[in-house]
Amino acid sequence: MIAETVCSAVSAAGLGIALVTAYRKRFLTATRIAAYALVPIALVMTGVVEWLAGTAFSPTAWAGFGLLGLSWVLFMTTRAVERRRGGTRQERKERKQQRRAAGAPAQPGTVAPTAPAPSLGSGSRPAARPAAAPKSDDDFSDIEAILKKHGI
């Protein structure tokens, strides 16, 4: 009974504010305020407020909301752990099989035994290049092979 009275008062106050706003020739804002003001009285008329009042004082309902919250926390925790690990167990197994089939190293970040050692020189300026050798027909054979590979 009190909730219905409060909702009616809130709706009436909101409609009053909408009328003042419309009087100031701000019709779009007044319409939006009126729309918000009609929501509480609509909830009273549909019976939602009565249902909420009955639910608010029910220990069983609060226990149910608590369980919903707990399940949400558990779900989000498992999602976070899954993202840190890089997917589900099946997805990790499939990626591992694909790496083995492709001949890639099993662990990310490992280096193949035949790979050259990384250079540790300064990264801010390029290394000095040796003097260019005189060009011959062999220099363009690599370029021709690349162009043929791409169909150019």
Image (spheres, rainbow, N blue to C red):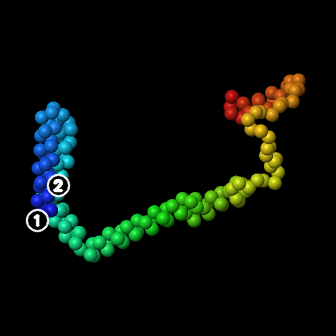
N-terminal-most mark, 1 or 2: 1
Mark 2, Cα crowd under 10 Å, few <14 / some 14-19 / many 20+, is many
Q: Residue at x 37, y 67 (%)?
A: 69
Q: Residue at x 45, y 63 (%)?
A: 76
Quick check: 132 above or below 28? above
Q: Position of residue 119 (x, y in %)?
A: 80, 43
Q: Residue at x 18, y 46 (%)?
A: 35
139 with respect to 21 (left or right): right
Q: Which mark is residue 73?
A: none
The residue nearer to you, when weighing 38 against 101, is 38
Quarter of the image where the N terminus is located: bottom left
Quick check: 138 above or below 62? above
Q: Residue 41 sits in which quadrant?
A: bottom left
Q: Position of residue 16 (x, y in %)?
A: 12, 44
Q: Residue at x 74, y 55 (%)?
A: 110
Mark 1 and mark 2 in contact? Answer it, CB < 8 Å: no
The residue nearer to you, when weighing 15 against 109, is 15
Closer to the eye: label 1 or 2? 1
Quick check: 18 above or below 25? below
Mark 1, Cα crowd under 10 Å, few <14 / some 14-19 / many 20+, is few
Quarter of the image where the C terminus is located: top right
Dot 1 lies on which element?
loop
Tag 1: amino acid: Met
Residue 139 visible, this angle:
yes
Mark 1 and mark 2: Cα distance apart in space: 14 Å
Tag 2: amino acid: Pro
Q: Position of residue 113 (x, y in %)?
A: 81, 54
Quick check: 47 above or below 10? below
Q: Circle 2 is placed at which residue position?
A: 40
Q: Circle 1 is placed at which residue position?
A: 1
Q: Residue 20 sits in which quadrant?
A: top left
